[in-house]
Image (cartoon, helix red, strand yellow):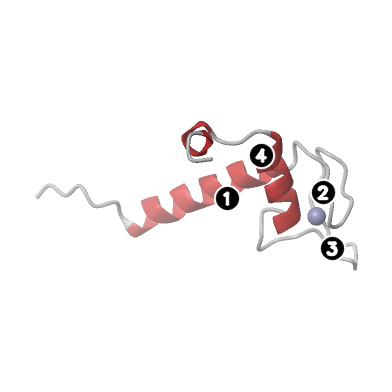
């Protein structure tokens, strides 16, 4: 039996990879929220690194503003 649907494990792996890419991408710019320098992971005010979110939303926005993805460039 052939199926093109990904297994649950494949979906989870893909999601984790996208999450890691998002974090790596966000960390190319400094964070305006927690002031983490580029290359460093965002931290909570307690000093604990973010574990659920790849980075603070403001940092992800700052990264996208610095270099918009090609597919979104023609929309503006
Ligand atoms: Zn941050």
Who's the residue at 75% across and 50% down the image? 59
Q: Is residue 49 left or right of residue 12?
A: right
Mark 4–mark 3 distance (CA, rounded to whole Å): 20 Å
**Which residue is labeled 4 in the image?**
25
SS at mark 4? helix
Mark 3 and 2 residues: CB-CB less than 8 Å, in contact? no
Q: Is residue 54 left or right of residue 46?
A: left
SS at mark 1? helix
Mark 1–mark 4 distance (CA, rounded to whole Å): 10 Å
Q: Which mark is residue 19?
A: 1
Name the outermost residue toward the front.
76
- Whether residue 24 is visible, yes or no, is no
Residue 11 x/y as whole percent: 39, 54
Q: Earlier in the sequence, mark 1 or mark 3?
A: 1
What is the crowding at mark 3: few (fewer than 14 residues within 10 Å), some, or many (at least 20)? few
Who's the residue at 87% across and 48% down the image? 36
Q: Nearer the viewer, mark 3 or mark 2?
A: 2
The answer to whether the beta carbon of the residue marked 1 is less than 8 Å from any atom of ligand 1 is: no
**Which residue is labeled 2 in the image?**
31
Mark 1–mark 3 distance (CA, rounded to whole Å): 18 Å
**Which residue is labeled 3 in the image?**
48
């Amino acid at each position: 039996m052939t199926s093109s649907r990904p297994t649950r494990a494949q979906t989870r792996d893909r999601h984790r990879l996208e999450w890691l890419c998002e974090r790596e991408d966000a960390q190319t710019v400094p964070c305006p929220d927690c002031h983490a320098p580029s290359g460093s992971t965002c931290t909570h005010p307690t000093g604990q690194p973010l574990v659920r979110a790849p980075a603070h939303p403001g940092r992800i926005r700052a990264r996208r503003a610095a270099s918009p993805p090609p597919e979104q460039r023609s929309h503006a």
